Image (cartoon, rainbow, N blue to C red):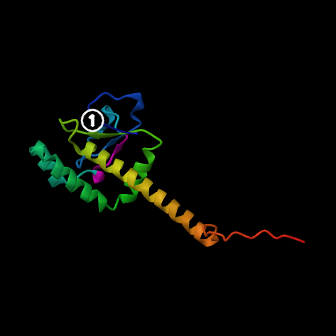
Amino acid sequence: MIKVKHVLETVESDDGQRIWVEPIGLTKDLREWCKVDHVLPHLGPPIHAWKTLEEHPDAYDYFRARYHEMLKKSPYRAALQSLAVASRHETFTLLHQSDDPDHNSAAALHQFLSELKCELQRDKLTQTLHLQSRSLVGSRSWKRQAPVAPTVSL
């Protein structure tokens, strides 16, 4: 499960790993005080899109589109896939610094990871179905067999 919180919100026992995902770093003191386990600004949004959202809170759709586009082309795609898969079995919390609890870097990353998780599940299902259909075609068990006339002995 993925949780989204402001970095200054109360730390809870079920937060799991707490991950800072803003495009700017975090001081060591603040990191310790807020119990941040990982600082990953390289997974944060492009700085110009982030600044646009900071200045124009109504530009969230633009911000999210730019951020998601960057994440799709990211050299960290494998790490993002790992996070998406990990969210099935463990809890971690994405931390942001925005005043808006619904429109921020962590919320946009959460949406991307959720979509990626669905995409990975769909790809896995498609691959499984493809392999099953290949094995059926190869065995020819799917072909309709002509009925065999009973033999009568005299």
> In front here: 107 or 20?
107
Residue 102 location in percent, x, y? Answer: 22, 38
Q: Which residue is mark 1?
A: 7
Residue 109 location in percent, x, y? Answer: 29, 47
Residue 42 lies, with reference to residue 134, above or below; the image says: above
Q: Amino acid at mark 1?
A: Val
Q: Secondary structure at mark 1?
A: loop
Residue 49 lies, with reference to residue 153, above or below; the image says: above
Residue 151 lies, with reference to residue 126, above or below; the image says: below
Q: What residue lies at 36% left-to-right and 59% top-to-bottom?
A: 77
Left or right, 15 with reference to 30: right
Left or right, 110 with reference to 13: left
Q: Is residue 39 magenta?
A: yes
> In front here: 152 or 58?
152
Q: Is residue 93 magenta?
A: no
Quadrant in which the N terminus appears: top left
Which image quadrant is residue 79 in?
bottom left
Q: Which span is picked out in magenta?
A: 37-43
Q: What residue lies at 16% left-to-right and 46% top-to-bottom?
A: 60
Residue 24 location in percent, x, y? Answer: 22, 48
Q: Residue lying farthest right?
A: 154
> In front here: 49 or 124?
124
